[in-house]
Each structure stands twice: as structure tokens, then as C-alpha cells.
Image (cartoon, coloured by chain):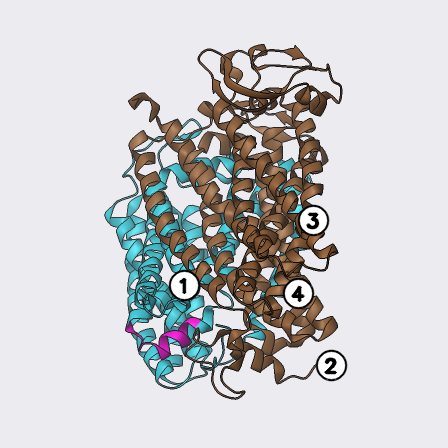
Amino acid sequence: MLDYFTAEMLARAQFAFTVAFHIIFPAFTIGLASYLAVLEALWLKTGDDNYLVTFKYWVKIFAVTFGMGVVSGLVMSYQFGTNWAVFSDKAGPVIGPLLGYEVLSAFFLEAGFLGIMLFGMQRVGRKLHFAATLMVAFGTLFSAFWILSVNSWMQTPAGYAINEAGQYVAADWWAVVFNPSFPYRLVHMVLAAYLTTAFVVGGVGAWHLLKDRDNRPARIMFSMALWMAAIVAPIQILAGDMHGLNTLEHQPQKVAAMEGHYETEKGVPFILFGIPNDAEERMDYAIKIPYATSLILTHELDGEVKGLKDWPRSERPPVGIVFYAFRIMVGLGLLMAGLGLWGLWARARGKLYDSPLLKKAAVVMGPAGFIAVLAGWVVTEVGRQPYTIYGLLRTADSISPLGAPAVATSLAVFAIVYFTVFGTGVVYILRLMRLTPGATTEGPQAGQPALPAGTTPVAAYLETTRDKPAE
Amino acid sequence: MDMLDLPLIWAFLIATAILIYVILDGFDLGIGILFPFLRRDKDRDLAMNTVAPVWDGNETWLILGGGGLFATFPLAYAVLMPALYAPVIAMLMGLIFRGVAFEFRWRSENHRGHWDFAFTAGSIVAAFCQGIALGAFVQGIEVSGRAYAGGWWDWLTPFSLLTGIALVIGYALLGATWLVMKTDGPLRAQAARFAGITGIGTVLFIVIISLATLSLDPRFMDAWLSTPAIYYTAPVPLAVAGATFWLWRSLRGGTDIEPFLAAITLFILSFIGLGISLFPNIVPLEITIWDAAAPDESLGFLMVGTVVLLPIILAYTAYAYWIFRGKVKSSEGYH
């Protein structure tokens, strides 16, 4: 067991831990930034202050989440070097410039306009403020573009050559950026971020509607979220399927692990659930749907699908984690689509706000997006093992010349700090979500100072914007 | 682009990004360092509101420094990060605590004291670790092949502790002069006193560290004192003396923006001094800019976008500062 705690395993654990924590925040802020832009646009267009109240409600949650995203992302930008020095040296010439573009085109844009978005309403007026909100939203999407290009290149490297120093260098930047898995992964992740946000917003709206079914901002949240679920969740299932087919083409052993198939066969069933027995190379207690895997992957009932035994063990990813995580992701995706349909049906009958059961289901499904996103990343990242750059550079050959105790110490520090800081942050976010939207509009009158800041959130902000009549 | 010395241009750009980071995040870290001395809660809220709209733009320059180094000098990045492992990780932890404190302190009345402490402690740890990393970097990194070859504790020396303390004091000076510029009344007066004290400390440390650097290695001595180098290097210490005088005079009566500009000038001059000592190495005394550079295809690819994007970034960053210009009043802030 002690052998398990090598510097490599610890460095992997550390990266997995920090990146898993990190991804939660951008997965939420990518969607939330776009949502805020839509809310502000609706406010400007209709003049309905309920949209502004909803905007103010979520902008505070956005600020807390974004702050945590920035600092946890900062860690990532240095962790390549601290823990994966050999990888950094070899892959730096290819993926470094892509990360450079992420900083230049995305991070600065977000950070530069975030201040105006949060603090600038009184200073720049409505239209410029809306422009700032849009810039923040674009920034989050540009960021997704570049970081997913980097990740996809590590999954499906293309457009590269190897120089005399043993580094990967770009031969064709277009091929590097738009590597084979990138378009699929980008679409899949951005949709995932939108769905994640929709379910959080919907869950919060539903929770407040359970207490007061006439709360207008809560109705806005609930209704918009269920539209998103109804439209985006089915598209996401389609996008996920296409992403899976792309993976089958480029990383067949990952798909074999996702499916949990050891044998290469025709007419392969889909294993609904089972317990992978890697030592014996078989699936125990499997519940199967006949022909389903062949149908999904080859679009033929008796299509042949490769099993894990086609590759030596040293080329296979860990099966259990990938197998289970894939089922969690797909299961949640189907539940999300189901809730979307339910909402659609309730809406068609004109009873969207009437069913307590629908609202309760939306509350329960509130965090579903986060779990699905994490599970999805586990599938794709663990499924890439034993490589950091698929087929080119092994994980074992990527690490820094560090001793296990050094990595173990920093891992322990990361764990304590992350759980303390981000755990507290999540508590604060939940507290913000507990505030009834619009409830504080009876706050202080215009002209009264808003200090101490933090005690009169929405009211003070609303008053200051009301000072300027709509154009 | 074949005619251009891309590695040299990139070294200059990365150095500039780091300098911009040091100045910009320097003043907001400095406010964290001075925080416990400010009256609660009014002056603390005010001080924090002066930097709240800009701090994460400031910190983005650090991401550019790290990301840019990774992109353009991957070998240096791969050697330096393991070499500076402990201070870099500790710095990141410090930045996490002080970064989240900006939002968290408003979220809970009961915990505000805790987050104020986290803001200060995080700022001090981040500044101190950056100083230690700087010192460890200047005194040289042991390299073998394409990897760091030293021990876990190489970064910890009397010299690096000295640079660590120096940076904490220097950032406090930037923070104090920033508050002089951005606030009024008792807070401004208090900040001016801090600026005087930390100004003396900063200049003192500049002198001590300069002399200590010269004694680290004969090559540093050569870079500064050999003829004809000395004709080019001599203006730097003279300019430091001039900037010190400017700082002293502006604190005793001048416009409120001048002390901040004088403090920035001290930082720029120190940075130029650092450049004189280290050039042309990017891993001091071991690896040169050209040895560590990524191939020209990578440098050129990123250069194309940088030429377009960097001026735009500078423009909207300046715009954001312009929007929040002038003295900050207590009623502002979205919380």
C-alpha cells in the first residue's frame, strides 16, 4: 500500500484535487456570466425592474464564485511547473502559447470589466455597464475556448513535430488549436456550464417559490431555467453522443473503459450497471441492454466494438473509476432532460408554478450539473491515462524531480486550505441564495449612505440606479 | 519575423509583465499589509473599496507572468518552479486567502475579523514569499541537464530572507502612497505617516540588497563596476537617490499623486538594477534567455496576438482605472 504513495501518485492526486475544485467555479461562472448578460438585456429592453432585481441577486453570487475561480485558477497556472516540470518543458512550446492566449484574450477581459460590472453602474451609466457585463461573459467563453483547446490537444495531439531537445513543437498551429477532439469537447463543456447554471438558478428559484409562489424574480429564475433545461439538455445528450463517437475514433481504449467491455465482440450490449473486476478482466453482476452499445457506437445492431483485452494492461486506463463516473454523468444528464420535459409539460398546461412536486424536484436537482461536470471530467481525464499527452508522453515520465514528502506536504496544505476557504465560500453562497429575491427593496431611501457595505445589498444598488431615469 | 530576436523581445515582455504585476498588485497587497493598523471598520472598508474594482485585474498580470514564462521559456519555467516549490505554493496559498477576503468579509458580520486577518496574513505571506523567490532566484539555481538539481531548502538563505522582508516593506510603501492618492481626511494623514516610515525602510533595503547582491558572485560585480559598464550602471543608483528625494519632498507637501509615482519609480529602478545583474540569464548563472526559449514558431505565434491584444488590454485597464479615478468616498461599493 505504501508503494502507492509515490511522488507520481501524489502529484496526480494533487492535480486532480486542485483542478476538480477549480472546475466547479468556472463551470458555474461561464453560464452565470451569460445569464447575467441576458437578464440585464431584458431589463434594458423591457424596463421591468424585476429583471434588475434578479440581476443584482445573482451578480453578488457571481462575484463570490468568480473570486474563488480566480485564485484557484492562479494555482493551476503554476502547478504545471511545480509538479509536472518535464511535461512543461516538453509540451510548453505547444500548449504554452494557447494558455498565453487564454490569459491575453480572456482573463484580462474578465478581470478588467468585472470591476465595472460590480461597482461601476453609478459611474458609467446603463449602456456602458451592459457592455461591461457582455465583455465579462465573452471573457468566460474565450477562456473556455483556449483551455479546452489545450486539454483536447493533450487528448488528441495533432499538428506537432519533435525537436532535437525532445520538445513537442508546433508544425501547424491551426491543426494544434483545432485538434480532432476540440470542437466536440468545447461544445460539450460549454453546454454543460450552461446546464449547470440553469439548474442552480432553477433550484434557487424553485426554493423561493415553495415559500412564496408569487415572488416575481423567483418565477423569472424558475421559468428561464426550465426553458434552458428543456432545450439544452436534449442538445447536450446529442453533443455527448457525438463526442463519444469522436473518442471512439481517437481513444478507443477510453471508450472500452467507459463501456466496461473487456472482450472484442459483435452485437455488444450496453452494461447498465455492473462491477468491473479488473483482476479477472470481466464485468461482475452486469445488467445489460442487448445490442445497445453496438447500436450507439457503430449505429448497427451487430457492429463490432473493441474490448480492453485488445490492449496490453500498460496501455489501459483504470477501468472502475471511468466506468462508474460515466454512468453518473449520463444518468444525471437523462434526469436533467427529464426535468426539462416535465417543465415543458407543466408549462403547456399553464401550470408551471402550481406543482410543488416539480419545484421540489428542481431544488433536489440544483447541484446536479456540478456532479455531472465533475464526473465527465473524471471520465475524460482518467480515461486518458496512462498518458498526459495521449500516446506520446506517459504520466510517469511527466513529473517534476520532487520527493514524495514534498508533494505530500503541499497536497495536505492544499486540501486543508481548499476545504476551509472554498468550503466557507460555498456556505456564503448558500446564504446569499437563502435571501429572498427582492425582499429588501423596502430598504433605505435614496441619498442615504449604503454603508456599512454588505448590510443593505439590493436596496442601495436599486436606489442608486433609480436616480438615473431610463433613457 | 526571422530578423527579430524573438527570445530577447519575449524576455523583455515577460519582465515588463512581472514589473507591471509588482507595481499593481504591490499596492493592493500593500493595503493588506497595512490593514491591521487602520481603524475598523470605516477606514478598512474604505481602503478595501479603493482596490476592490481593480485587484483581480492586477493579479491577472501574475497569471500572465506564469503563463507567459511557460509559453515562451518552458525550460526556465520547468526548472524554476520545482526550485522555488515551497515559496511558490505558499505564495499561492497567501493569495487565495487574501483574494477571497475581498468578498467574504462582506458576507458575514461575525467572521469579518477573521477575514480581515486572512486578508492581512495572506498579503504578508504572498509578499514575503515573492521576495524569497526573488532572492532565491538571484542567488542562483542549481541545474543539471534540463532539470532542477538542488535540494528542497535551497531557496532558504539569509539573502532570500532579506529580500522577503524588503518586498513586504516595499509593497507597504506602495499601498500607503496609493491610499494617500485615493483617500481623504484622517485615513490619508495616517497613510502619509506610513509612507514616510516604509519609505525609509524601502530605501534602506534597496541599499543593503544591492550591496549584498554584488558580494554574491564576481559576475554581478563585473556587470556593475567594470569599465565601461559602470558608465551605464552608475545612473541607476543616482536615480534612486533622486526618487528618494522626490518621495520625501512630495510627502511633506505636493500633490497627492506624487508620492505614489515616486514609490513606483523606486520599484522600476530596482527592477532595472535586477535586469543589469541578471542579463542575459533567465535562470541566474545557469541558463540564458536563448537557451531556455521556446522555438521561434511558438514565440512568433504568440507574438502576433500579443501585438494586437496587449495594447487593447492596456487601453481597457487604463479605462477601468480612469472610471474609478479620484478620491474614493465611503458610500461607494456594491455590497
Name the disc covering residue A471, or none: 2
Q: Amino acid at mark 2?
A: Glu
Q: CA distance from mark 3 to mark 2?
A: 35 Å
Discs 3 and 2 share one subunit: yes
Q: Amino acid at mark 1?
A: Phe
Mark 3–mark 1 CB contact (< 8 Å): no
Q: CA distance from mark 1 to mark 2?
A: 35 Å
Mark 4 — residue?
Answer: A39
Which element is circle 1 on? helix
Magenta span of residues = B37-48
> Tag 1: Cα neighbours inside 10 Å, few (<14), some, or many (≥20)?
many
Mark 1 — residue?
Answer: B104
Discs 4 and 3 share one subunit: yes
- First in sequence, mark 2 or 4: give its number: 4
Q: Is residue B38 magenta?
A: yes
Q: CA distance from mark 4 to mark 3?
A: 19 Å
Mark 3 — residue?
Answer: A230
Q: Nearer the viewer, mark 3 or mark 1?
A: 3
Left or right for A223, reference A316 = right
> Where's residue A91, x and y in %?
55, 32
Find the residue positioned furthest to the left: B158
Q: Is residue A322 above or below residue B173?
A: above
Rendered colour, chain B: cyan
Rendered colour, chain A: brown
Front residue of A53 and B23: A53
Rendering quarter of residue B106: bottom left
Rendering quarter of residue A465: bottom right
Mark 4–mark 1 CB contact (< 8 Å): no
> Tag 2: Cα neighbours inside 10 Å, few (<14), some, or many (≥20)?
few
Front residue of B264 and A142: A142
